[in-house]
Amino acid sequence: MKKLAFVLLAALAVSPAMAQRKTKNLIIVTLDGMRWQEVYRGADSALINSKFTNDKEDVKKRYWAATPQERRAILFPFLWNTVAKQGQLYGNRDAGGKDEIANPYKFSYPGYNEIFTGFPDVRMNTNDPIVNPNMNVLEYINKQKGFEGKVIAFSSWERFPQILNVNRSGLPVYSGYSGLKNADANARLKYLNELQQNVPHYVNDSTRSDFVTYEYSKEYLKQYKPRVLFMSFDETDDMAHAGNYKSYLEFAKQEDGFIKNLWEMVQADPFYKNNTTLIITCDHGRGYAQLDSWRHHGSDVVGAEQTWFAVIGPDTAPTGEVLTGTTYHKQLAQTMALLLGLDFKANAGHEVGDAIKSVLTGK
């Protein structure tokens, strides 16, 4: 009898990775270099009134309000009217929450490596097109039963084929101005292959418009029904580096609108409705110690390690802002896997950060 009781207890003690999840599909969206300050405070009065903002009165009219709560809802209406009510947000330092990158370099390639490999590798200290030796969680998911060929990435920045090591991983990664190669692609996707070559190149001839990246992601989702979609925007970082605060705010609000439209489309689709989790985050923060440092990030920039993320889905308790403890982006890879009932094991042998259990438990 004692042995039988022990067996029953052991059977009930299912590990979190093996627990039954409602999440069957996953969408990850990144806003490159988007500061937590605007996410939680809205538009910054010091920057609006600085040399970094042209047409100050127009910016005040469009983005300013008396309180941070009002301003952030103006700038990120989807985050604050939907995710904050139905999901969770992390990284509001004003209220005691902390979310950070663990890598010491505080710029894009190391940041994305950390998010997707769960490993703040000190060797990843470049934005050059070096091939990432670390196994990533998208690659891992794509090899699991039921997910084969159902993982896709679209990014504005051209570096993701190297970050996600497409030659080894076999992941379809459409970055920069690369066009979709599927022979059976619908007319809209084929048109986007042509359109992206003719839209204005805001940054350079390698990084495409976030609008086109969004349109690719949306149309691919409609036709092919991937189980995991990664969509990466870039223009918030570009406008910050350019010192253009008005455009930084405009692109942030536009991207919030893209995510809202995508989520509404997902919730209207029987394939995705009520079984899809959405994670929204960034790759690094920006400076704050001096006014000019908002434009910059890197190992010598105070505050560039400070980040944020948000999550909404059927397994995530609607607790709103999570204000206890510190979370790290190295934990996001295992969190993504855990949401799908998987346990991310990197066969390259590198460490993987522990999952953020409060995403699932609310505690």
Image (spheres, helix red, strand yellow):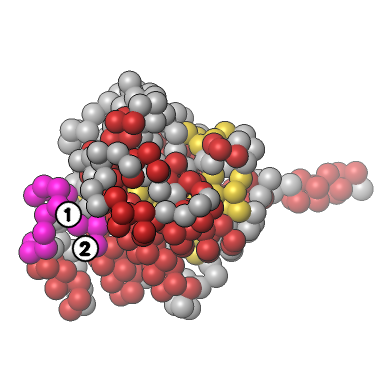
Residue 274 visible somewhere in the drawing = yes
Amino acid type, callout 1? Arg
| Position of residue 54 in the picture relative to residue 267 (left or right) | left
- Secondary structure mostly seen in the magenta stretch: loop
- Note whether 191 is above or below 343 in the view shown: below
Residue 309 visible somewhere in the drawing = no
- At horizontal 20% and vertical 72% (from top left) the residue drawn is 189
- Note whether 263 is above or below 28 in the view shown: below
Please tell me whether residue 310 belongs to the stretch shown in magenta. no
- Note whether 63 is above or below 290 in the view shown: below
The span shown in magenta is 197-211
Image location of residue 250, percent across then percent down:
30, 56
Q: Secondary structure at mark 2?
A: helix
The answer to which image quadrant residue 237 occupies is top left
| Position of residue 113 in the picture relative to residue 146 (left or right) | left
- At horizontal 36% and vertical 59% (from top left) the residue drawn is 61
In the drawing, what numbered circle is on residue 212? 2
Quarter of the rendering occupied by the C terminus: top right
Task: Name the foreground residue: 266 vs 40.
Answer: 40
- At horizontal 63% and vertical 58% (from top left) the residue drawn is 318
- At horizontal 92% and vertical 48% (from top left) the residue drawn is 1
- Disc 1: CA contacts within 10 A as few (<14), some (14-19) or many (>=20): many
Distance from Cα at disc 1 to Cα at disc 2 = 7 Å
Please tell me whether residue 205 belongs to the stretch shown in magenta. yes
Residue furthest out toward the front: 57
